[in-house]
Image (tube, rainbow, N blue to C red):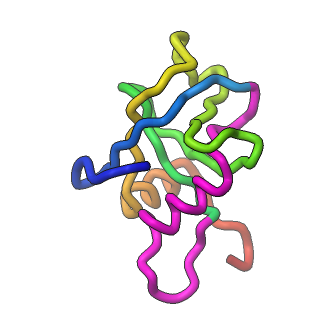
Amino acid sequence: MFEQFSSGYYLGRLYVEPYDGDHAVIHGDDHVRVNEHLYTTGEGVERTDAPLVMKLDSGGHFPVLGDDAVPTGTLALPTPLAPGDLPDRREVLLAKADRATELLRYAGWTPPEGR
């Protein structure tokens, strides 16, 4: 789904569509699979439910959660974040683990208690 792009990002192509939710989402299985493949190190117990951090076009970064109601291979964006020419297949940047952690921390995200 994503391949090496630069020192801070992976690049992928997803079907991107607007939706009425509060957060950007991809299918739950895709979310876990991307977390496991790109964000975990294989050492110890690691989270696979932390938000992914993506960027579309020249816009800002946004956290992406899992939602089984979204079709696989689709990124659903809250309408205020969605460009007017959607739905469409788009190139999407996915922040690498270190960069994603940094961006989430700046946005104020912290893992739930006990995790």
Specify the quadrant of the image occupied by residue 12: top left
Q: In this image, 52 relative to 99: left or right? A: right
Q: Residue at x 44, y 55 (%)?
A: 100
Q: In this image, 7 relative to 114: left or right? A: left
Q: Residue at x 57, y 25 (%)?
A: 81
62 w.r.t. 86: above or below = below
Q: Which percent across, then down, holds residue 105?
A: 51, 57
44 w.r.t. 29: above or below = below
Q: In this image, 37 relative to 23: left or right? A: left
Q: Which percent across, then down, holds residue 67?
A: 72, 47
Quadrant containing the C terminus is: bottom right
Q: Residue at x 60, y 62 (%)?
A: 32
Residue furthest to the left:
6
Specify the quadrant of the image occupied by residue 24: top right
Q: Which percent across, then down, holds residue 113?
A: 73, 73
Residue furthest to the top:
84
Q: Which residues are magenta?
A: 20-48
Q: Residue at x 64, y 63 (%)?
A: 49
- Count the marks: 0
Residue 32 lies within the magenta run: yes
Q: Which percent across, then down, holds residue 65?
A: 64, 49
Residue furthest to the bottom:
44
Q: In this image, 110 relative to 2: left or right? A: right
Specify the quadrant of the image occupied by residue 47: bottom right
Residue 93 lies within the magenta run: no
90 w.r.t. 9: above or below = above
